[in-house]
Amino acid sequence: MNIGVVIGEAKPTEVTAQSIRPLSVGEYVIVDSQNGKLLGLVERSIVSSDALTDIRNFDEAMESKEVAELNTRDKNYKVKIGILGFLDKLQKGQAIVPAVPPLPGTSILEATQQDLGMIFAPRSKEWIRIGSLLRNSEIEAKININRIVSRHIGILAMTGMGKSNLVSLIAKQVSSLQGTLIIFDYHNDYTNLSVPKISVTDAKINPRLLQADKLAEVIELRENADKQQRVLRESFTASVRQAKDFWTALEEGVSAFGHTTKGYADSASRVLDKIDDAKHRFSDILDPDCGDPVDLIKEGRVNVLSVAELSERQANVGLSYYLQELLNDRKDSYWAKKGRKLSRNTTKFSSPLFVIIEEAHVFIPKGEHTDTKYWASKVAREGRKFGIGLGIVSQRPRNIDPNVLSQMGSLAIMKIVQDDDQQQIASAAESLSKDLLTQLSSLNIGDAVLVGQWVNLPSIVHVDEVKGKAIGSDLDAVAEWSESTKYKEIAAESTQGLIQKDLLMD
């Protein structure tokens, strides 16, 4: 169906068109050019009225409104269309933009399911359904799982816009493919996720396996407490690491250092207090007898590792340890397949891994060093070769290290309002046009702009809702207040009944 015509000045990458009806931003159309059909994306849509232009007062507006309603030619529907490439080439995975722009007068056609299906919903196994095109809702929207594992993804949005739902959907799809996914769950959003082959555990830290400075972070010694730091460093010996009773051996070592080293008795006493506090407060987290915490991760499963009980410093130590060990294991597995002899006999993971870090701005902060940021950056740089993918999830893109964000080969961008967040995203996503960027503030819950290597073309989609538990949903304060009030009334009535009974008995 002919829905418009190219007008004015045309370029190989964009045209302006007059349409028969208002076209939605994000809608795909066909530009029937002289050299073949081109696929276009509506990036800007403007509706105007000649009769209702240059209005000076309300009465004139009402009179002009009547004129506009009688004049079928009054309404002006103008759109800017970005040219994505020749349709037949895009259907074969090749994005080729025409050298010669479409001529003014070229017809704009509606895009059909036959036109778009092969581009946005390929049928090969690595393409998994994520939802449907927002403006062409009959068209499935799929993403390439291979490309997110090798090229990494960032999921960015304001709170409550659907980040957790998208992660849950990816988890379900990975589970159906018998892949290995690790989610570092900062707020226990995924502990009740209904997915086959899921393993939900608390992330553990084995203090025996840490360096002294990392153990200091875990037991929460102050960074500038130099004498306490030295006490712990000197006491944390190889024999302590290997001791049957780790905590007792460490405390004895600290106590001995305080008694034998002049001027360190008070510092040693403070370190002992920190150790005693940590081993009681964090007994479920700090486990010297848990072996290698990486053994908690099961291959071929969705692994939810809760870090909700860890302090921010502890979580940073834990995440950096996991990332380091996972990357090293994948490297060893890679070289073993190449025939290289390794120092250890076996590797834990024989197939690719995909790791998702929630609240990425906490662990991969802009302008600040953290161990997790170091290892996340290393995974982002080296993961493609060794088969470990990284996903970062955040509602504060402006606070994420831009070097790590720029290495995310694919992005899912949901509603973002802040200008500095949008600019950070724009610098990380070269394929995101300025016009699409302006749409981020108007997206609804579950809508997302997908750009990068996991899709054949930039697209605005509505993500499928994961059925079951309302992942990351807002609490219903009104319902909870009502429930609380009801229980208080029941309790009051019960108390009054007991008082009356006691009076009668008296």
Image (tube, rainbow, N blue to C red):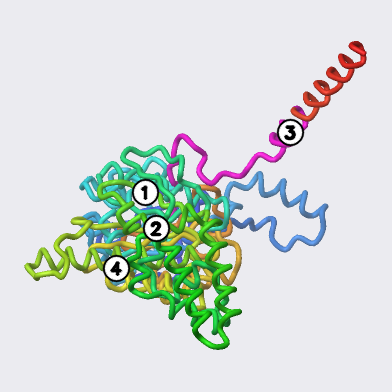
The residue positioned 55% from the left and 49% from the top of the image is 444
Task: Please report the bounds of the magenta region as a residue range.
Answer: 459-486
Residue, disc 4: 97
In the rendering, at what x and y percent does residue 127 appear?
A: 27, 49
In the rendering, at what x and y percent does residue 361 appear?
A: 51, 67
Contact between marks 2 and 3 (CB within 8 A): the answer is no
**N-terminal-most mark, 1 or 4:** 4
For this rendering, which residue is in front, 7 or 132?
Answer: 132
Q: Return the mark for residue 170.
A: 1
Residue, disc 3: 484
Disc 1 secondary structure class: helix
State the separation of the CA atoms marked 1 and 4.
32 Å
Nearest-to-viewer mark from 2 and 1: 2
Question: Amino acid under label 4?
Answer: Val
Q: Is residue 361 visible?
A: no
Q: Is 223 left, or right, of 376 in this rendering?
A: right
